[in-house]
Amino acid sequence: MLSRVLRGHGPATPVERRQIPYWQERGWTRQGNTYSGSYQTPYTAFSGRVIEHGRGHVHFLLYAPTDEIRRHSHWACFQNRGNDWYQVHMSRQPQMSAPES
């Protein structure tokens, strides 16, 4: 019990807000409501796009999924959109913040 009292909490450390948007930090480009870049995984990178269709309505697309993805149980979550682009269906839509330039 005494060790809990003595440890306490240190002084608060302010955390500075990112100076550039996350998409820019990751090397993506933006043209209107479409962001293009690479989805990075520990194993490989995939070309992709994120398209905002109004507040809270976002489409995530992946170009030319690999055979490993096509054999995965989540392959059912990918919808062919033509020209080797696939929309990834999310069970829960990720939160998007207001667009930044």
Image: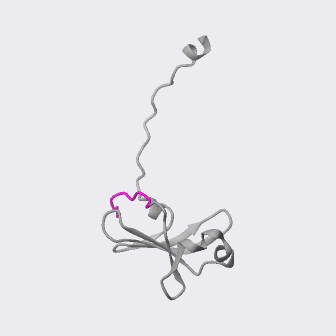
Q: Quadrant of residue 4?
A: top right
Query: Relative to 78, is 15 on the left or the right?
Result: left
Apparent side of residue 95 relative to residue 70 in the rendered image (left or right): left
Over which residues does the magenta segment extend?
93-101
Residue 28 position (above or below residue 5): below
Vertical order, 83 against 36 (above or below): below
In the foreground, 52 or 10: 52
Quick one: 2 or 15, which is closer to the camera? 2
Residues 59 and 23: in front is 59
- Residue 8 lies, in percent from the top left, at 53, 19
Name the image quarter holding the N terminus. top right
Q: Whole-percent x and y of residue 47?
A: 55, 76
**Residue extending furthest top?**
2
Question: Which image quadrant for residue 12?
Answer: top left
- Quick one: quadrant of the C terminus? bottom left
Q: Which colour scheme is used?
A: one colour
Identify the residue at image location x=44%, y=40%. Answer: 15
